[in-house]
Image (tube, rainbow, N blue to C red):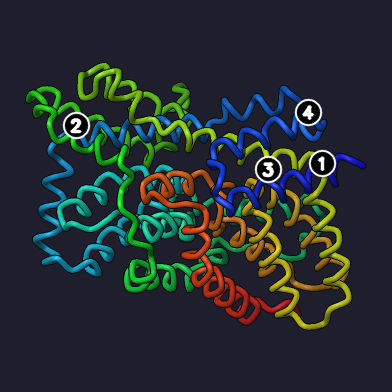
Amino acid sequence: MNTLVICLIICTLTIISYVWGKVSMAMTSMVSFAAFVITGCLSPQDALANFGNSNGVMIMSMFVVAAGLQRTQFVKHVAHSVNAISKGSITKVMFGYVTISILLSQFIQSPLIVFGIMAPMMMATCKDMGINTSKVMFALGISAIVTCSALPLGSGATVAAELNGYLEANAYTGFVVQLTDPMLVRFPVVIVAAIYCIFFAYKVAPDIEAEEKDIKENRQKVELPPLGPFQERAGYIIFILTTLALIFQKSIPRGIVMPTWLICFIGALAMVLFGVLKGREATNAMNIPMYLLFVGSMTMGSALAQTGAGTVVGDYLANMANTIGNPYIIGAIFFIIPFLLTQVMQNRAVMLIFIPIAIQACKSMGANPIGIIILVQAATLTAFMTPMATAAVPMYMAAGNFTLKDVLKQSIIPALVFSVVSIVWTMTIIPLY
């Protein structure tokens, strides 16, 4: 039995265990982590590297930065203000938070960071309104994921150049992706996502009470004395500076090495150094089970990529596309399959596999590849159904106390709607022929 088959078996069993829910997701992810190494699907060095993955550092750091902000009175003031303006209307609350989330997602390329910024304020608002966070965290999470880099602002301005690089690398330069083409394709989904998240998502979200452990921790937090004036101001300033550094990261002088993970890490460190959080409070803020889930998810994606599972699927799709005449069906194939595969693989890996395959398929058909390759990219950027899809999913699972079943149930409707809108719209405005 070759490693490809073994890898697929391990992945299947892992997903079954996640859905079954009898074993904790953290334990399942670590068992699969070990299985991938023992069976030779992944080298020990490559597997171990996932513990030092930059997204993992960002997750842990943003937990601490968020805890620091929650320790101040800022989130309480925001919550009271939002509640007063909305007059208790959850729809109005969602309108404000979702709109800000979408705007931030145009300047900050990581949905994880956007959610990390917005979640503390949303949690405080939920507490002030007397509703469970499970009603709103899925909507807040997918608003950051689905709309990331959709407009030609900030990181979105580089999308066209990246796609043109793929066309040049595959010697199909008769077509050029214009700066506004990715926005033209993705903007309807941004609108649909905003409408769904604001008006409908909370209505179908589960109403989950916080676990007893969380309730006890929240009671302890209530009993903590207010911060001193210096620490209070430091909490505000650190959070604001961290957010601004993330938004204007590309403007930081070249001589200063400041990757995204380091900005988050410095923000978390500053929360402790300036006394906003004590060392124990910072440690308690780190959600270790979610971190282990993330590590296991990254390991699964690495194993799938290294064993060639994605390439096998991609080659099969290219052959299928060449035998199908209907452009809408071809568009559906190159959206749905990458969308589903990104649920268990890193989106960058799926893009690296499928965009060249889509270009070659269009090249052999003499078709326009622009719409197809943007569809592939859009599919990989709108994956939100599993914790393996993107690092933001484990964060909103933790914030909403969701199980994988909860996430899957909430994902079905938006996944179908976003897929249909993306495919029909794209293949209509940028036809193959």
Left or right of residue 200, residue 313 in this image: right
Q: Are marks 2 and 3 in contact (CB under 8 Å)?
A: no
Mark 4 is surrounded, within 10 Å at the Cα level, by few (under 14), some (14 to 19) or many (20 or more) other residues, namely few
User: Is 158 situated left or right of 128 in this image?
Assistant: right
Q: In the depicted view, which residue is nearer to us: 300 or 13?
A: 13
Q: CA distance from mark 1 to mark 4?
A: 14 Å
**Callout 3 amino acid:** Gly
Q: Residue at x 66, y 46 (%)?
A: 14
Q: Which mark is residue 220?
A: 2
Look at the picture and state if 99 lies above or below 417.
above
Question: Along the polypeptide, which appears first: circle 4 or circle 3?
Answer: 4
Please give the residue where the numbered disc 1 appears in the rendered image.
307
Which disc is residue 105 wearing? Answer: none
**Numbered circle sitting on residue 38:** 4
Q: Earlier in the sequence, mark 1 or mark 3?
A: 3
Answer few, some or many: residues within 10 Å of disc 2's Cα (few below 14, many 20 plus, some between 14 and 19). few
Provide the secondary structure element on which disc 4 rests: helix
Q: Nearer the viewer, residue 3 or 428?
A: 3
The quadrant in which residue 25 appears is top right
